[in-house]
Image (tube, rainbow, N blue to C red):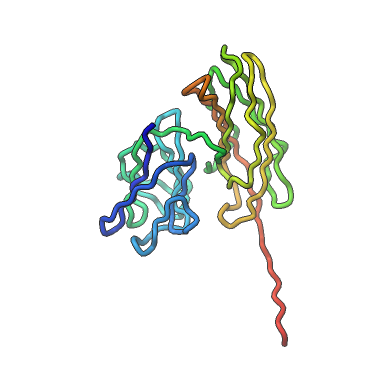
Amino acid sequence: MSENFIYVTDKDGWTKQFPIKRNLLHLGSSPHNDVVLEPARGAGVSPRHIQILPNPATGKYRVVNLSQADVDADGQALPPRAFIDFDTGRTLHVGEFKVQIQGEAKVIQAGSRARNVGAKQQTQSSDKIGAQLSLAHRQLSPTMVIEASLLIMNLGNEGNVQFQIGVEGLPEDSIEIGPGPILFAGAEKRVPIEISHPRSSETLAGPLRLRVYVSAPESYPGELTVITETIEVMEFLDHAVVLTEQ
């Protein structure tokens, strides 16, 4: 299987390639990004500037502008907090850097984790894999987890189907997922999901879009159901008290 890459070119023409090994990638000047655009190699980059994730329905990559300024998407202005489905081989201008994606967009199966402002739950369906997501509530506070239930249905004719689940949008340690079930044809099972507040400045307060992927690559290759749900991340304040002698 060929590996997909992100190619980054700095202001002096130096180029480096980064393999795409996750469904959700962040690019920016902060060292906490998956792809770090170092300030010494180019200016005009926010700590967390853009987000890239696959859109299997179109075979393209979805690029989300997380910065406070427009991003030049191969001549098209991408406003802050907006997204665009981007063809591979085209060029993004992120500050003084050029960014290209090479390789067809595909979901990478892993214990994974999307973000953008959205309204209601949306589902990209497969006629062989059924899924329904239920949330106890949609406000994610530092003191209370969101308990969710994912109903997985084997709508195809295959038996003993091993389903795989991935969730994107929050750090891995903020999401606990029950094991993917093995189902006979026509069977269904609920899988528990717990979503915890990341308690980190890396995740901004406000609307956050979660994407839940359900697949069964061994039995139904190429089939994928994606559920998109928006939750509200509540503000987290970390205080410290320092005592000094007078």
Number of numbered discs present? 0
- Position of 192 relative to 242 (above/below): above
Residue 214 at x, y percent in the picture:
57, 28
Residue at the extreme bottom of the image, as rendered: 246
* Nearer to us in this view, 83 or 194: 194
* Nearer to us in this view, 128 or 210: 128
- Position of 135 relative to 171 (above/below): above
Quadrant of the frame with the N terminus: top left
Residue at x-position 26% and y-position 59%: 12
Quadrant of the frame with the C terminus: bottom right
Q: Is residue 178 left or right of residue 54?
A: right
Residue 182 at x, y percent in the picture:
63, 23
Residue at the extreme left of the image, as rendered: 13
Residue at x-position 72% and y-position 85%: 245
- Position of 171 relative to 237 (above/below): above
* Nearer to us in this view, 22 or 74: 22
Q: Is residue 103 left or right of residue 30?
A: left
Query: Can residue 29 be seen in the rendering of this structure?
Result: yes
Residue at x-position 59% and y-position 26%: 163
Residue 2 at x, y percent in the picture:
36, 34
Identify the image quadrant of residue 183: top right
- Position of 102 relative to 188 (above/below): below
Residue 150 at x, y percent in the picture:
66, 30
Residue at x-position 71% and y-position 72%: 241
Query: Can residue 80 be seen in the rendering of this structure?
Result: no
Identify the image quadrant of residue 56: top left
